[in-house]
Image (spheres, rainbow, N blue to C red):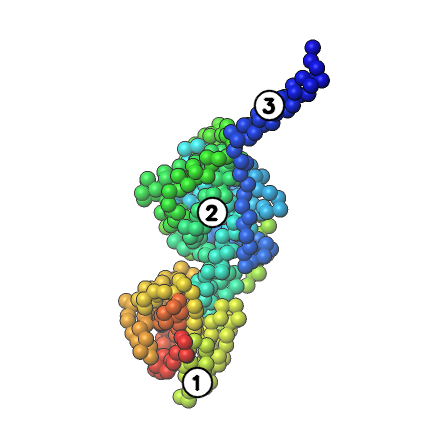
């Protein structure tokens, strides 16, 4: 028979045992992982969503997209929704999921949530966990707002977009300029997002948490990356956009070591079925996609096939800006020059050529009134002075990088001849000529070729000045003496 004292002792023994058991269970279970605070980006939530939809609309114009009714897209959407449910609603985004008929192994997610997975990625995954790993990693980039944060570091891209927009008359100063600042560029049959190794480490860490919460082994994420690397030539764009942060698999294994144990979903019958179907889908190479984009093939075929972007931004219906045809007398430079102060530099200009600054990109245009219209330039010079850590290159490499960027943003622009080393007021500079289509029609009313002369001058400490002299091909030699005089007159302001 238990006394009161014995009963109290037994009672507390039970309580202590229960507490000890709970503590041991908790210790063995580990700490449930939670997604980190994504921090702040220079773009608002609304701006990021708008930017992502605008970029996604360009994908539908430049790449073959499978309709939402296809088994592959339905499966990717189902898998994407499973992953998205792991993100707290107050920090999530309006994710949407699409499939590209692209042979290459690649996937990308845009600001605000639009995600695209290549059919080649579905076919390359060995199991559902690996495919979920790719998607979870991309979803983590959106969650951490990496593209939006990139805008803080991309004054070089933004400035080049402003230059290219002024030359070609396209809206690069608007959506394209913003995309460039966010590290998003189209080219060579794909969309390219440039992430740093730090971004990759964060996407791996957050992606691992998304996978764990969705019931997938986070190590599958690293397994898929390792598989691509082992294939060597496969998936070059994916690896280029996603630089290895180093010891990816070991880092994920260390991260999950303290998490509660759980039974993972490795594969599914639905994945096996869709993967087999994916192998039979007609897919295209990057070159085929690039060629189709230039001809407008994908925009037409996507519309015909019913591949439409949900919540697509309204089309303005406005073509690229053009400059009305003008007689040569209306654009010829005066023989009298005036000094123009342009921040990092000062230079002389013909007195009948005006100076205009683009408030978005900071680029300056010096041109005759009849040679510019709607932000496009047919005669004159576009100047950009920038400061960014990305600008610490020598003259040759900087000029080559600028020329490459201009070519990427204008399908008609091609380099003509070799890059030359020159001097601008004693400073080392690079010089190269390019050719594209002028925004001003020729005398016959048809498009005419344009000649552009690019000069890039690195100034050290992350500073540089770029100039692009512009004129129709058949009038460039008439303008060249004026362009030479303007270039010779350049003076760098104090501290530049």
Seen in the picture, residue 201 relative to 398 is either above or below; the reply is: above
Number of other residues with Cα within 10 Å of mark 3, as a class: few under 14, some 14 to 19, many 20 or more: few
Please name the residue that numbered disc 1 is placed on.
339
Using the rendered view, name the quadrant where residue 427 is placed: bottom left
Whole-number angstrom distance, CA of label 3 to CA of label 1: 88 Å
Number of other residues with Cα within 10 Å of mark 1, as a class: few under 14, some 14 to 19, many 20 or more: some
Which residue is found at the position 39% from the left and 67% from the top? 462
Give whichever of 113, 195 is nearer the camera: 195
Is mark 2 in CB contact (under 8 Å) with mark 3?
Answer: no
Whole-number angstrom distance, CA of label 1 to CA of label 2: 50 Å
Image quadrant containing the N terminus: top right
Q: Residue lying furthest bottom in this view?
A: 336
Whole-number angstrom distance, CA of label 2 to CA of label 3: 41 Å
Give whichever of 91, 35 is nearer the camera: 35
Give whichever of 11, 32 is nearer the camera: 11
Q: Residue lying furthest right in this view?
A: 4
Which residue is found at the position 34% from the left and 65% from the top? 393
């Amino acid at each position: 028979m238990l006394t009161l004292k014995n009963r109290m002792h037994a009672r507390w023994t039970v309580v202590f045992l229960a507490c000890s058991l709970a503590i041991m269970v908790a210790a063995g279970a580990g700490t449930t992982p939670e997604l980190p605070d994504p921090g702040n980006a220079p773009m608002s939530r609304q701006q990021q969503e708008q930017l992502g939809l605008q970029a996604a609309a360009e994908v539908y114009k430049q790449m073959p997209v499978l309709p939402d009714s296809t088994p592959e897209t339905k499966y990717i959407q189902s898998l994407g929704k499973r992953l998205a449910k792991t993100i707290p609603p107050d920090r999530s985004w309006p994710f949407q999921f699409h499939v590209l008929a692209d042979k290459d192994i690649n996937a990308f997610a845009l600001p605000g949530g639009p995600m695209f997975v290549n059919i080649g990625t579905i076919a390359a995954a060995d199991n559902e966990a690996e495919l979920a790993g790719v998607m979870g990693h991309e979803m983590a980039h959106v969650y951490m707002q990496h593209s939006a944060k990139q805008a803080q570091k991309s004054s070089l891209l933004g400035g080049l977009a402003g230059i290219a927009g002024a030359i070609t008359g396209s809206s690069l100063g608007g959506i394209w300029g913003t995309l460039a600042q966010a590290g998003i560029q189209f080219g060579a049959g794909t969309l390219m997002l440039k992430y740093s190794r730090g971004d990759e480490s964060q996407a791996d860490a957050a992606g691992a948490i998304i996978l764990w919460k969705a019931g997938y082994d986070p190590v599958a994420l690293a397994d898929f990356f390792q598989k691509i690397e082992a294939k060597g030539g496969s998936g070059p764009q994916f690896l280029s956009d996603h630089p290895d942060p180093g010891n990816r698999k070991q880092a994920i294994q260390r991260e999950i070591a303290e998490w509660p144990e759980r039974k993972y979903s490795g594969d599914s019958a639905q994945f096996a079925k869709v993967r087999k179907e994916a192998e039979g889908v007609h897919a295209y190479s990057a070159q085929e996609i690039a060629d189709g984009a230039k001809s407008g093939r994908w925009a037409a075929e996507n519309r015909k096939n019913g591949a439409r972007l949900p919540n697509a931004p309204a089309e303005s219906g406005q073509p690229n800006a053009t400059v009305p045809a003008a007689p040569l007398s209306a654009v010829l430079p005066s023989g009298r020059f005036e000094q123009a102060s342009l921040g990092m530099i000062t230079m002389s200009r013909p007195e009948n050529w005006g100076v205009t600054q683009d408030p978005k990109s900071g680029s300056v245009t010096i041109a005759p009134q009849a040679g510019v219209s709607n932000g496009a330039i047919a005669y004159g010079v576009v100047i950009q002075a920038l400061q960014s850590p990305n600008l610490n290159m020598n003259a040759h490499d900087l000029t080559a990088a600028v020329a490459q960027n201009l070519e990427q943003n204008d399908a008609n622009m091609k380099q003509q001849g070799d890059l030359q080393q020159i001097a601008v007021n004693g400073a080392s500079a690079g010089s190269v000529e390019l050719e594209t289509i002028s925004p001003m029609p020729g005398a016959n009313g048809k498009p005419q070729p344009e000649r552009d002369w690019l000069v890039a001058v690195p100034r050290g400490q992350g500073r540089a000045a770029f100039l692009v002299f512009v004129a129709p091909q058949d009038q460039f030699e008439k303008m060249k003496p004026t362009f030479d005089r303007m270039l010779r007159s350049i003076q760098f302001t104090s501290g530049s």
